[in-house]
Amino acid sequence: MSVLTVEQVVAAQKANIETLFGLTNKAFEGVEKIVELNLTASKAALSEVAGHTQSVLSVKDVQELIALQSGLLQPLADKTAAYSRHLYDIATSTSAEFTKAAEGQASEAQDKFAELVDSATKNAPAGSEAAVAILKSSVSAANSALESVQKAVKQATEVAEANFQAVAATTATKPATAKKK
């Protein structure tokens, strides 16, 4: 039977630590992008509030004030939708990095486990063919189940992304159709 050496354990730990630091860096990159987005949005909002305040102070009558206020809603909705899209894009790209790393780790672990099973079955004592066949069948079934789960998660993610894109597109076109009425 195959026995793990100290070098193999150290190499595995080193690879796991490198993966952890890589994912941590990706997480920080995502947080930095969100902070940058929030700062940009805050600066823009502050500038717009200052401009709007100046406009309100220069209003001469109630109708002009109502027109000014009603003209404010559409740009606000557009900016909110754009902010949501940017936030979604950041979250999606960061999530994709984590998914890619997780899939790589899972694939590597499956390969190593398959090697271990092969090594164990080659060195199995005579008369254990039935147990070896059951073990191989169990490993194959587990791998198939894992692949099915990964495919289902990918499909669910794709559906969620398509739904978000559809809602974003609908939100972007609704104000234009509302203006036409």
Image (cartoon, rainbow, N blue to C red):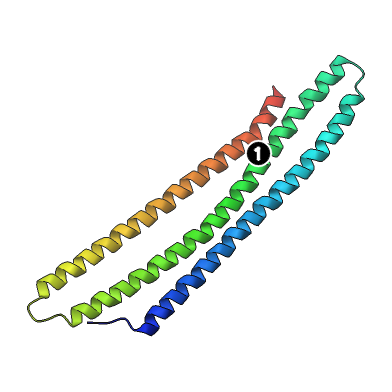
Image location (x, y in percent) of residue 45: 77, 39
Identify which residue is drawn at 15% across, 67% down: 134
Amino acid type, residue under disc 1 in the picture: Ala
Q: Is residue 93 left or right of residue 114?
A: right
* Quadrant in which residue 79 is drawn: top right
Residue 20 vs residue 87, the one in the foreground: 20
Residue corresponding to mark 1: 81
Quadrant containing the N terminus in the rendered view: bottom left
Q: Is residue 24 left or right of residue 103?
A: right
Image location (x, y in percent) of residue 56: 87, 25
Identify which residue is drawn at 62% across, 54% down: 31
Under circle 1, the secondary element is helix
Judge whether 113 appears above or below 161 on screen.
below
Q: Residues within 10 Å of mark 1 (few under 14, many from 20)?
A: some
Image location (x, y in percent) of residue 23: 53, 64
Q: Is residue 119 left or right of residue 59?
A: left
